[in-house]
Amino acid sequence: MTRRQNNNQWSGGIAAHPAPKKFRVQKPAGKVLASIFWDQDGIFLIDYLTKGQTINAEFYSSLLVQLKDILREKRRGKVTKGVLFLHDNAKAHRALATQKKLDCLGFQCLYHPSYSPDLGPLDYHMFP
């Protein structure tokens, strides 16, 4: 008995097990970056980054302007004391142009602290 015949016998033979189907491999859809702005009452703005674009200070500043307009529209009367704004330490968030835009819009920035396992950044909306 040849080796091939021996392998067929061991696996139950060719007739017992049809050849496995081959599936076409599709390219993955890719990653999509979403910038989401919200407060305790709900989501204000979701912006999806277009393919090939990166978030820089100019792009992020334009999102902040959109956010300010939406705040005026959706939260009339609630924004009299200003806006406490929390974002992480990404380059676009720390850029001088972004800091100037935050000041211009009247947002008071809460700086993202170093990592702490007992209190995550999403918990800060509870403790102004």
Image (cartoon, grey):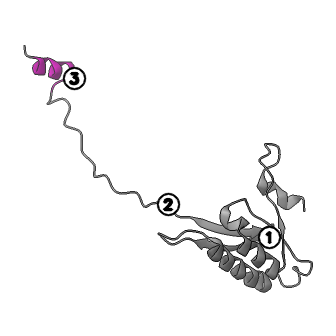
Q: Distance between the residues labelled 1 and 3?
A: 61 Å
Residue kind at label 3, given as amino acid type: Ser
Q: Earlier in the sequence, mark 2 or mark 3?
A: 3
Residue kind at label 2, given as amino acid type: Lys
Q: Position of residue 2 (x, y in %)?
A: 8, 16
Q: Where is residue 89 in the image (x, y as percent from the top left)?
A: 72, 59
Judging by the rendered image, the residue that carries numbered circle 2 is: 31
Q: Which of marks 1 and 3 is nearer the N terminus?
A: 3
Q: Where is residue 8 in the image (x, y as percent from the top left)?
A: 15, 23
Q: How crowded is mark 1: few (under 14 residues within 10 Å), some or many (20 or more)?
A: few
Q: Position of residue 41 (x, y in %)?
A: 80, 70
Q: How far apart are marks 1 and 2 (CA)?
A: 28 Å
Magenta stretch: give its range.
Answer: 3-13
> Is 12 within the magenta?
yes
Judging by the rendered image, the residue that carries numbered circle 3 is: 11
Say which element carries label 1.
loop
Q: Nearer the viewer, residue 33 or 54?
A: 54
Residue kind at label 1, given as amino acid type: Asp
Judging by the rendered image, the residue that carries numbered circle 1 is: 41
Q: Reply above or below: 42 against 80.
A: above
Q: Distance between the residues labelled 2 and 3?
A: 42 Å
14 left or right of 58?
left
Residue at 57 percent across and 71 percent down: it is 48
